[in-house]
Amino acid sequence: MIITYHGDDYFKLQSGQYTVLIDPTNQRSFKGATLAIHTVRPPEVEASDELFWIDHQGEYEVRGISIQGATLGKDAAGEKTAYRIVFDEVVFGILGYCTKEPDPTIQELFQKCDVLILPGKGKPYLSIDAAAKFARQIEPSVIIPSLDGDFKAFLKEFGQEKAGTEEKFVFKKKELVPKAMAVHPLHA
């Protein structure tokens, strides 16, 4: 599995012949992608015939990839959705542009999560304290902060004073340590 960060909340998850895009901002990346997921309902964009597009809550199955979306509510930016994705046996929890502490239904949805991607920057998104609290309740193997920024305060919450940023995170499911909560900041 390869996780590549492209800035903001845009991630590319790749395994084998399949690619999942999280909050893509560049339509050129649609070519060859299997699935695009948006955590905030986007303005109208031209989707490819090969690309399955998800931008709201519900349950989906696309080429063996299982997706569950649950609402985070609406605000001035629009309807926001959290997603649980099971891709190549790895369970991902995606909070996207979350601005307030998720309710217990999201915590329940993210149980047994291997990789948690959540805001790691603070205001105007989920506060660093609330993000750390949520992650500790979930206890994923890996935590990846999103939405660009200086992640020093986020890392400090997890006792990691220093962590180099990587361009991508490459791993196999068997390499993940359950409940390790290892923070892996990525850079675009």
Image (cartoon, grey):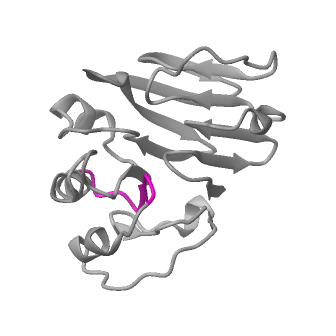
The answer to which quarter of the image holds residue 172 is bottom right
- Whether residue 13 sits left or right of residue 47 in the image: it is left
Q: Position of residue 132 (x, y in %)?
A: 22, 59
Q: Quick check: 166 left or right of 141?
A: right
Q: Residue furthest bottom?
A: 162
Q: Does residue 86 sit above or below 159 in this rendering?
A: above
Point out residue 115 in the picture as x, y percentages from the top left corner: 45, 54
Residue at 36% of width from left, 25% of height from top?
77
In magenta stretch: residue 27: no
Quarter of the image where one finds residue 167? bottom right
Left or right placement of residue 157 versus residue 184 in this view: left
Magenta-tinted stretch: 138-148
User: For the C terminus, which image quadrant?
Assistant: bottom right
Classify 188 as above or below 70: below
In which quadrant of the rendered view does residue 81 lie? top left
x and y, in percent, of residue 17 in the image: 82, 42
Whether residue 110 sits left or right of residue 114 in the image: it is left
Residue 140 in magenta?
yes
* Picture residue at 41% right of the left edge, 40% below the top: 96
Q: Is residue 24 above or below residue 38?
A: below
**Closer to us: 29 or 34:** 29
- The quarter of the picture where the N terminus appears is bottom right
What's the residue at 33%, 63% (across, down)?
179
Tell me how many marks there are. 0
Q: Taking 127 as reference, is 21 above or below it?
A: above
Residue at 32 percent of width and 75 percent of height: 152
The location of residue 98, given as percent across then percent down, is 30, 38
